[in-house]
Amino acid sequence: MAQVSLKKLVKSYGAVQVVQGIDLDVADGEFIALVGPSGCGKSTTLRMIAGLESISDGAVEIGGTVVNDLPPRDRNISMVFQSYALYPHMTVRENMGFSLKIAKQPQSEIDRQVNEASAILGLEALMDRRPAQLSGGQRQRVAMGRAIVRHPEVFLFDEPLSNLDAKLRTQMRTEIKKLHAKVQSTVIYVTHDQVEAMTLADRIVIMRDGHIEQVGTPDEVFKRPASRFVAGFIGSPPMNIEEATIRDGQMVFRNGDSLPLPAQFAGAVTESQKVVFGLRPDDIFPSGHGLSSGGAGMIHEAELPVSITEPLGNETLVFVEFAGREWVSRMLNPHALRPGERIAMSFDFSQAHLFSAETGKSLARPVKD
Ligand SMILES: Nc1ncnc2c1ncn2[C@@H]1O[C@H](COP(=O)(O)OP(=O)(O)OP(=O)(O)O)[C@@H](O)[C@H]1O
Ligand SMILES: [Mg+2]
Protein backbone atom coordinates (compact mmCIF):
# COMPACT_ATOMS: atom_id res chain seq x y z
CA MET A 1 0.00 0.00 0.00
CA ALA A 2 1.35 3.43 -0.80
CA GLN A 3 -0.58 6.26 0.59
CA VAL A 4 1.48 9.43 0.65
CA SER A 5 0.98 11.92 3.45
CA LEU A 6 2.51 15.34 3.80
CA LYS A 7 2.43 16.62 7.37
CA LYS A 8 3.08 20.33 7.86
CA LEU A 9 5.74 20.06 5.21
CA VAL A 10 8.12 23.02 5.06
CA LYS A 11 11.01 23.96 2.81
CA SER A 12 13.07 27.03 3.58
CA TYR A 13 15.94 28.50 1.64
CA GLY A 14 17.62 30.76 4.16
CA ALA A 15 14.92 32.98 5.60
CA VAL A 16 12.48 32.30 2.77
CA GLN A 17 9.85 29.58 3.19
CA VAL A 18 9.01 28.37 -0.30
CA VAL A 19 6.78 25.55 1.00
CA GLN A 20 4.85 26.81 3.98
CA GLY A 21 3.65 23.84 6.01
CA ILE A 22 1.41 21.90 3.65
CA ASP A 23 -0.84 18.99 4.67
CA LEU A 24 -2.02 16.50 2.09
CA ASP A 25 -3.22 12.89 2.16
CA VAL A 26 -2.98 10.97 -1.09
CA ALA A 27 -4.79 7.63 -1.14
CA ASP A 28 -3.23 4.43 -2.45
CA GLY A 29 -3.69 4.32 -6.22
CA GLU A 30 -4.92 7.89 -6.41
CA PHE A 31 -3.88 10.25 -9.22
CA ILE A 32 -3.17 13.70 -7.81
CA ALA A 33 -2.32 16.74 -9.96
CA LEU A 34 -0.35 19.56 -8.39
CA VAL A 35 -0.97 22.85 -10.18
CA GLY A 36 -0.19 26.50 -9.55
CA PRO A 37 1.74 29.44 -10.97
CA SER A 38 5.45 29.35 -11.62
CA GLY A 39 7.47 29.47 -8.40
CA CYS A 40 4.63 28.38 -6.08
CA GLY A 41 6.59 25.36 -4.81
CA LYS A 42 5.30 22.42 -6.87
CA SER A 43 8.68 20.98 -7.87
CA THR A 44 10.13 21.61 -4.44
CA THR A 45 7.26 19.66 -2.86
CA LEU A 46 7.69 16.81 -5.33
CA ARG A 47 11.44 16.72 -4.79
CA MET A 48 10.96 16.51 -1.03
CA ILE A 49 8.64 13.53 -1.54
CA ALA A 50 11.25 11.95 -3.82
CA GLY A 51 14.08 12.60 -1.39
CA LEU A 52 15.98 14.82 -3.81
CA GLU A 53 15.54 17.84 -1.54
CA SER A 54 15.97 17.93 2.22
CA ILE A 55 12.92 18.62 4.38
CA SER A 56 13.17 21.75 6.55
CA ASP A 57 10.27 20.83 8.84
CA GLY A 58 7.30 18.46 8.97
CA ALA A 59 7.21 14.99 7.48
CA VAL A 60 6.67 12.92 4.36
CA GLU A 61 5.08 9.52 4.94
CA ILE A 62 4.91 6.82 2.28
CA GLY A 63 2.86 3.73 3.10
CA GLY A 64 2.52 4.92 6.68
CA THR A 65 6.28 5.23 7.26
CA VAL A 66 8.10 8.53 7.74
CA VAL A 67 10.69 8.64 4.95
CA ASN A 68 12.32 11.99 5.78
CA ASP A 69 15.70 10.39 6.27
CA LEU A 70 15.49 7.66 3.63
CA PRO A 71 17.52 8.11 0.44
CA PRO A 72 15.49 8.26 -2.81
CA ARG A 73 16.31 4.67 -3.81
CA ASP A 74 14.72 3.30 -0.62
CA ARG A 75 11.41 5.15 -1.00
CA ASN A 76 9.90 2.90 -3.68
CA ILE A 77 9.17 5.85 -5.92
CA SER A 78 10.02 6.66 -9.53
CA MET A 79 10.28 10.18 -10.80
CA VAL A 80 9.85 11.35 -14.40
CA PHE A 81 11.12 14.85 -15.15
CA GLN A 82 10.42 17.40 -17.80
CA SER A 83 13.87 16.86 -19.31
CA TYR A 84 13.84 13.12 -19.63
CA ALA A 85 17.62 12.86 -20.18
CA LEU A 86 18.00 9.43 -21.70
CA TYR A 87 21.51 8.02 -22.02
CA PRO A 88 22.35 8.84 -25.66
CA HIS A 89 24.79 5.98 -26.18
CA MET A 90 22.36 3.31 -24.95
CA THR A 91 19.53 1.67 -26.86
CA VAL A 92 15.95 1.98 -25.69
CA ARG A 93 16.23 -1.48 -24.15
CA GLU A 94 19.40 -0.55 -22.27
CA ASN A 95 17.97 2.77 -21.11
CA MET A 96 14.90 1.07 -19.73
CA GLY A 97 16.79 -1.70 -17.98
CA PHE A 98 19.57 0.47 -16.59
CA SER A 99 18.19 1.03 -13.08
CA LEU A 100 17.56 -2.70 -12.68
CA LYS A 101 21.09 -3.45 -13.85
CA ILE A 102 22.47 -1.00 -11.29
CA ALA A 103 20.32 -2.78 -8.68
CA LYS A 104 22.08 -5.99 -9.77
CA GLN A 105 18.94 -7.78 -10.91
CA PRO A 106 19.56 -10.96 -12.96
CA GLN A 107 19.47 -10.43 -16.73
CA SER A 108 16.41 -12.67 -17.14
CA GLU A 109 14.47 -10.52 -14.69
CA ILE A 110 15.61 -7.30 -16.40
CA ASP A 111 14.46 -8.67 -19.77
CA ARG A 112 11.11 -9.67 -18.33
CA GLN A 113 10.45 -6.25 -16.78
CA VAL A 114 11.67 -4.33 -19.82
CA ASN A 115 9.53 -6.42 -22.18
CA GLU A 116 6.48 -5.95 -20.00
CA ALA A 117 6.96 -2.18 -19.84
CA SER A 118 7.64 -1.89 -23.57
CA ALA A 119 4.39 -3.75 -24.28
CA ILE A 120 2.43 -1.40 -22.01
CA LEU A 121 3.96 1.63 -23.72
CA GLY A 122 3.93 0.28 -27.28
CA LEU A 123 7.71 0.52 -27.65
CA GLU A 124 8.39 -3.03 -28.90
CA ALA A 125 9.44 -1.98 -32.40
CA LEU A 126 11.88 0.62 -31.12
CA MET A 127 13.86 -1.35 -28.57
CA ASP A 128 17.16 -1.37 -30.46
CA ARG A 129 17.18 2.29 -31.44
CA ARG A 130 19.11 5.02 -29.68
CA PRO A 131 17.38 8.16 -28.34
CA ALA A 132 18.59 10.28 -31.28
CA GLN A 133 16.57 8.02 -33.58
CA LEU A 134 13.30 8.64 -31.71
CA SER A 135 10.64 11.34 -31.81
CA GLY A 136 9.97 13.50 -28.73
CA GLY A 137 6.91 11.50 -27.76
CA GLN A 138 8.77 8.21 -28.17
CA ARG A 139 11.60 9.46 -25.96
CA GLN A 140 9.07 10.52 -23.38
CA ARG A 141 7.59 7.02 -23.44
CA VAL A 142 11.05 5.53 -22.93
CA ALA A 143 11.52 7.83 -19.92
CA MET A 144 8.26 6.52 -18.56
CA GLY A 145 9.29 2.96 -19.33
CA ARG A 146 12.45 3.53 -17.34
CA ALA A 147 10.27 4.55 -14.41
CA ILE A 148 7.77 1.70 -14.60
CA VAL A 149 10.24 -1.20 -14.84
CA ARG A 150 10.96 -0.60 -11.18
CA HIS A 151 7.32 -1.19 -10.22
CA PRO A 152 7.30 1.75 -7.86
CA GLU A 153 4.42 2.19 -5.47
CA VAL A 154 4.47 5.91 -6.21
CA PHE A 155 5.11 7.75 -9.48
CA LEU A 156 6.19 11.35 -9.30
CA PHE A 157 5.91 13.34 -12.53
CA ASP A 158 7.26 16.87 -12.91
CA GLU A 159 5.78 18.43 -16.06
CA PRO A 160 6.68 15.37 -18.12
CA LEU A 161 4.90 16.58 -21.26
CA SER A 162 5.89 20.23 -21.37
CA ASN A 163 8.58 19.69 -24.02
CA LEU A 164 6.13 18.17 -26.47
CA ASP A 165 4.04 19.86 -29.13
CA ALA A 166 0.30 20.17 -28.61
CA LYS A 167 -0.65 17.05 -30.56
CA LEU A 168 1.89 14.81 -28.85
CA ARG A 169 0.90 16.17 -25.48
CA THR A 170 -2.67 15.13 -26.03
CA GLN A 171 -1.56 11.68 -27.18
CA MET A 172 0.78 11.21 -24.23
CA ARG A 173 -1.89 12.43 -21.84
CA THR A 174 -4.08 9.56 -22.99
CA GLU A 175 -1.11 7.16 -22.65
CA ILE A 176 -0.54 8.27 -19.07
CA LYS A 177 -4.20 7.78 -18.24
CA LYS A 178 -4.12 4.26 -19.68
CA LEU A 179 -0.88 3.55 -17.88
CA HIS A 180 -2.38 4.54 -14.57
CA ALA A 181 -5.44 2.39 -15.20
CA LYS A 182 -3.12 -0.58 -15.82
CA VAL A 183 -0.54 -0.22 -13.09
CA GLN A 184 -2.76 1.41 -10.43
CA SER A 185 0.17 3.07 -8.68
CA THR A 186 -0.22 6.23 -6.69
CA VAL A 187 0.65 9.22 -8.91
CA ILE A 188 1.58 12.77 -8.01
CA TYR A 189 1.75 14.79 -11.19
CA VAL A 190 2.97 18.38 -11.40
CA THR A 191 1.73 20.40 -14.35
CA HIS A 192 1.20 23.97 -15.51
CA ASP A 193 -1.49 22.75 -17.81
CA GLN A 194 -4.89 22.79 -16.21
CA VAL A 195 -6.40 20.70 -19.01
CA GLU A 196 -3.89 17.97 -18.19
CA ALA A 197 -4.79 18.27 -14.52
CA MET A 198 -8.54 18.20 -15.16
CA THR A 199 -8.41 15.21 -17.51
CA LEU A 200 -5.94 13.05 -15.61
CA ALA A 201 -6.42 13.61 -11.92
CA ASP A 202 -8.78 12.12 -9.37
CA ARG A 203 -8.12 15.24 -7.31
CA ILE A 204 -6.37 18.51 -8.07
CA VAL A 205 -4.25 20.40 -5.57
CA ILE A 206 -4.01 24.10 -6.36
CA MET A 207 -0.92 25.69 -4.83
CA ARG A 208 -0.09 29.35 -4.42
CA ASP A 209 2.95 30.96 -2.80
CA GLY A 210 3.99 27.80 -0.97
CA HIS A 211 0.60 26.86 0.45
CA ILE A 212 -2.41 24.86 -0.71
CA GLU A 213 -5.31 27.01 -1.85
CA GLN A 214 -7.79 24.17 -2.51
CA VAL A 215 -7.91 20.39 -2.92
CA GLY A 216 -10.82 18.83 -4.77
CA THR A 217 -12.01 16.72 -7.67
CA PRO A 218 -11.81 18.42 -11.09
CA ASP A 219 -15.55 18.98 -10.84
CA GLU A 220 -15.33 20.56 -7.38
CA VAL A 221 -12.51 22.97 -8.14
CA PHE A 222 -14.24 24.03 -11.36
CA LYS A 223 -17.76 24.39 -9.98
CA ARG A 224 -17.00 25.37 -6.41
CA PRO A 225 -13.74 27.30 -6.37
CA ALA A 226 -12.92 28.13 -2.75
CA SER A 227 -11.28 31.41 -3.67
CA ARG A 228 -10.99 34.07 -6.31
CA PHE A 229 -7.53 32.71 -7.10
CA VAL A 230 -8.79 29.19 -7.86
CA ALA A 231 -11.73 30.62 -9.82
CA GLY A 232 -9.31 32.52 -12.05
CA PHE A 233 -6.81 29.69 -12.33
CA ILE A 234 -9.07 26.76 -13.27
CA GLY A 235 -11.11 27.02 -16.46
CA SER A 236 -10.32 28.22 -19.96
CA PRO A 237 -11.03 30.88 -20.96
CA PRO A 238 -10.88 32.04 -17.34
CA MET A 239 -13.92 33.05 -15.33
CA ASN A 240 -15.05 36.66 -15.80
CA ILE A 241 -14.16 38.33 -12.49
CA GLU A 242 -14.81 41.92 -11.45
CA GLU A 243 -14.77 43.85 -8.17
CA ALA A 244 -17.92 45.57 -6.98
CA THR A 245 -19.42 47.24 -3.93
CA ILE A 246 -22.78 46.18 -2.48
CA ARG A 247 -25.29 49.07 -2.48
CA ASP A 248 -29.05 48.67 -2.06
CA GLY A 249 -29.16 45.13 -3.39
CA GLN A 250 -26.95 46.00 -6.35
CA MET A 251 -23.38 45.13 -7.19
CA VAL A 252 -21.90 48.44 -8.27
CA PHE A 253 -18.76 48.04 -10.36
CA ARG A 254 -15.86 50.48 -10.38
CA ASN A 255 -17.02 52.33 -13.48
CA GLY A 256 -20.52 52.80 -12.01
CA ASP A 257 -22.25 50.04 -14.00
CA SER A 258 -24.23 47.67 -11.84
CA LEU A 259 -25.95 44.30 -11.69
CA PRO A 260 -28.60 43.20 -9.22
CA LEU A 261 -27.17 41.04 -6.45
CA PRO A 262 -28.18 37.44 -7.25
CA ALA A 263 -30.83 36.44 -4.70
CA GLN A 264 -28.86 33.55 -3.23
CA PHE A 265 -26.12 35.93 -2.06
CA ALA A 266 -28.43 38.26 -0.12
CA GLY A 267 -27.60 36.73 3.26
CA ALA A 268 -23.88 36.49 2.57
CA VAL A 269 -23.05 40.18 2.23
CA THR A 270 -23.54 43.47 4.03
CA GLU A 271 -24.20 46.98 2.73
CA SER A 272 -21.02 48.69 1.39
CA GLN A 273 -19.07 45.42 1.41
CA LYS A 274 -16.48 45.06 -1.33
CA VAL A 275 -16.94 41.83 -3.23
CA VAL A 276 -15.70 40.09 -6.35
CA PHE A 277 -18.33 38.87 -8.77
CA GLY A 278 -17.53 35.92 -11.03
CA LEU A 279 -19.31 34.24 -13.92
CA ARG A 280 -17.89 31.62 -16.28
CA PRO A 281 -17.91 32.18 -20.06
CA ASP A 282 -20.45 29.35 -20.38
CA ASP A 283 -22.87 31.18 -18.12
CA ILE A 284 -23.11 34.32 -20.24
CA PHE A 285 -24.81 33.84 -23.59
CA PRO A 286 -26.75 35.75 -26.21
CA SER A 287 -30.37 35.67 -25.09
CA GLY A 288 -32.33 32.80 -26.54
CA HIS A 289 -29.20 30.65 -26.94
CA GLY A 290 -29.16 28.90 -23.61
CA LEU A 291 -31.16 28.02 -20.54
CA SER A 292 -30.44 28.81 -16.93
CA SER A 293 -29.80 25.71 -14.90
CA GLY A 294 -31.45 27.53 -12.00
CA GLY A 295 -34.67 28.32 -13.88
CA ALA A 296 -35.93 31.37 -15.74
CA GLY A 297 -35.98 33.61 -12.66
CA MET A 298 -32.21 33.37 -12.41
CA ILE A 299 -31.46 35.03 -15.75
CA HIS A 300 -30.42 38.66 -15.89
CA GLU A 301 -30.55 40.27 -19.31
CA ALA A 302 -28.56 43.24 -20.54
CA GLU A 303 -28.02 44.75 -23.97
CA LEU A 304 -24.30 45.08 -24.51
CA PRO A 305 -21.91 46.03 -27.32
CA VAL A 306 -19.83 43.29 -28.92
CA SER A 307 -16.14 44.17 -29.03
CA ILE A 308 -14.78 41.19 -30.90
CA THR A 309 -15.47 37.54 -31.68
CA GLU A 310 -12.97 34.68 -31.86
CA PRO A 311 -14.16 31.67 -33.86
CA LEU A 312 -12.40 28.49 -32.70
CA GLY A 313 -14.03 26.03 -35.06
CA ASN A 314 -16.20 24.09 -32.64
CA GLU A 315 -17.10 27.15 -30.60
CA THR A 316 -16.86 30.92 -30.71
CA LEU A 317 -15.76 33.33 -28.01
CA VAL A 318 -17.83 36.49 -27.97
CA PHE A 319 -16.44 39.47 -26.06
CA VAL A 320 -18.90 42.09 -24.84
CA GLU A 321 -18.19 45.36 -23.04
CA PHE A 322 -19.61 45.82 -19.58
CA ALA A 323 -18.48 47.43 -16.33
CA GLY A 324 -15.37 48.88 -17.94
CA ARG A 325 -13.98 45.61 -19.23
CA GLU A 326 -14.57 42.79 -21.68
CA TRP A 327 -16.66 39.81 -20.60
CA VAL A 328 -16.17 36.65 -22.55
CA SER A 329 -19.02 34.40 -23.52
CA ARG A 330 -18.52 30.93 -24.96
CA MET A 331 -20.97 30.00 -27.66
CA LEU A 332 -21.47 26.92 -29.78
CA ASN A 333 -23.20 28.43 -32.82
CA PRO A 334 -23.67 32.18 -32.58
CA HIS A 335 -24.97 33.98 -35.62
CA ALA A 336 -22.43 36.31 -37.19
CA LEU A 337 -21.78 39.31 -34.93
CA ARG A 338 -20.05 42.53 -35.89
CA PRO A 339 -17.89 44.58 -33.54
CA GLY A 340 -19.97 47.43 -32.11
CA GLU A 341 -23.25 45.58 -32.63
CA ARG A 342 -25.40 45.55 -29.50
CA ILE A 343 -26.84 42.23 -28.44
CA ALA A 344 -29.04 41.05 -25.60
CA MET A 345 -26.88 38.93 -23.32
CA SER A 346 -28.19 36.63 -20.60
CA PHE A 347 -26.27 36.27 -17.34
CA ASP A 348 -27.13 32.98 -15.63
CA PHE A 349 -27.14 34.11 -12.00
CA SER A 350 -27.71 30.57 -10.75
CA GLN A 351 -24.07 29.89 -11.69
CA ALA A 352 -22.65 33.12 -10.26
CA HIS A 353 -19.75 33.19 -7.79
CA LEU A 354 -19.08 35.77 -5.13
CA PHE A 355 -15.83 36.26 -3.27
CA SER A 356 -14.70 38.60 -0.54
CA ALA A 357 -12.56 41.37 -2.05
CA GLU A 358 -10.62 41.46 1.21
CA THR A 359 -9.76 37.78 1.75
CA GLY A 360 -10.46 36.39 -1.73
CA LYS A 361 -12.46 33.56 -0.13
CA SER A 362 -15.75 32.37 -1.55
CA LEU A 363 -18.77 33.96 0.17
CA ALA A 364 -21.40 31.65 -1.25
CA ARG A 365 -21.82 28.69 -3.55
CA PRO A 366 -23.62 28.60 -6.89
CA VAL A 367 -27.26 27.58 -6.51
CA LYS A 368 -26.84 24.26 -8.30
CA ASP A 369 -23.91 22.15 -9.52
N1 LIG B 1 18.02 26.10 -4.46
C1 LIG B 1 17.18 27.12 -4.27
N2 LIG B 1 17.57 28.21 -3.55
C2 LIG B 1 16.74 29.24 -3.32
N3 LIG B 1 15.48 29.30 -3.78
C3 LIG B 1 15.04 28.25 -4.49
C4 LIG B 1 15.84 27.12 -4.78
N4 LIG B 1 15.12 26.25 -5.51
C5 LIG B 1 13.91 26.82 -5.69
N5 LIG B 1 13.85 28.02 -5.08
C6 LIG B 1 12.70 28.93 -5.03
O1 LIG B 1 11.62 28.23 -4.47
C7 LIG B 1 10.38 28.63 -5.07
C8 LIG B 1 9.62 27.42 -5.52
O2 LIG B 1 10.30 26.80 -6.59
P1 LIG B 1 9.72 25.55 -7.36
O3 LIG B 1 10.76 25.09 -8.31
O4 LIG B 1 9.22 24.57 -6.38
O5 LIG B 1 8.50 26.19 -8.14
P2 LIG B 1 7.48 25.52 -9.15
O6 LIG B 1 6.12 25.67 -8.58
O7 LIG B 1 7.93 24.16 -9.50
O8 LIG B 1 7.60 26.49 -10.40
P3 LIG B 1 7.63 26.16 -11.99
O9 LIG B 1 6.19 26.01 -12.36
O10 LIG B 1 8.23 27.39 -12.57
O11 LIG B 1 8.43 24.93 -12.21
C9 LIG B 1 10.76 29.59 -6.19
O12 LIG B 1 10.52 30.89 -5.76
C10 LIG B 1 12.24 29.33 -6.40
O13 LIG B 1 12.88 30.50 -6.83
MG1 LIG C 1 8.66 23.27 -11.24
Image (cartoon, rainbow, N blue to C red):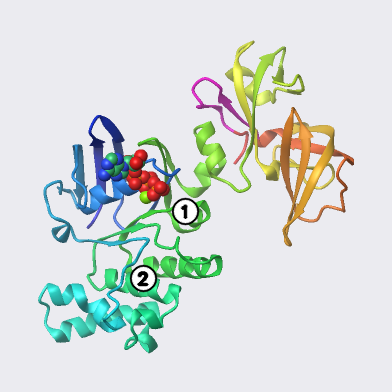
**Whole-percent x and y of residue 333?**
80, 56
Give amino acid for label 2.
Lys
Residue 285 horizontal/vertical position (percent): 77, 43
Front in this rendered view, residue 327 or 64: 327
The residue lying at 29 percent from left, 83 percent from top is: 91
Q: CA distance from mark 2 to mark 1?
A: 19 Å
Q: Nearer the viewer, residue 294 or 200?
A: 200
Q: Is residue 303 above or below residue 112?
A: above
- Helix, strand, or loop for circle 1? helix
Read off the residue under disc 2. Answer: 182
Identify which residue is drawn at 21% across, 45% down: 60
Residue 197: mark: 1
Q: Is residue 338 left or right of residue 10?
A: right
Disc 2 is placed on an element classified as helix
Residue 193 location in percent, x, y? 49, 53
Q: Is residue 54 visible?
A: yes
The reply to whether discs 2 and 1 touch (Cβ–Cβ < 8 Å) is no
**Which quadrant is home to the N terminus?**
bottom left
Q: Is residue 358 above or below residue 309?
A: above
Give the amino acid type for the residue marked by disc 1 in the picture. Answer: Ala
Sequence order check: which comes first, mark 2 or mark 1?
Answer: 2
- Against 243, is 140 above or below? below
| Magenta-drawn segment | 352-365
Q: Is residue 60 magenta?
A: no
The mark found on residue 73 in the picture is none
74 vs 207: above or below: below
In which image quadrant can residue 241 be found? Answer: top right
Residue at screen point 12% across, 72% down: 103
* Quadrant for the C terminus in the image: top right
78 sits to left or right of 229: left
**Which one is in front in this view, the residue at disc 2 or the one at disc 1?**
1
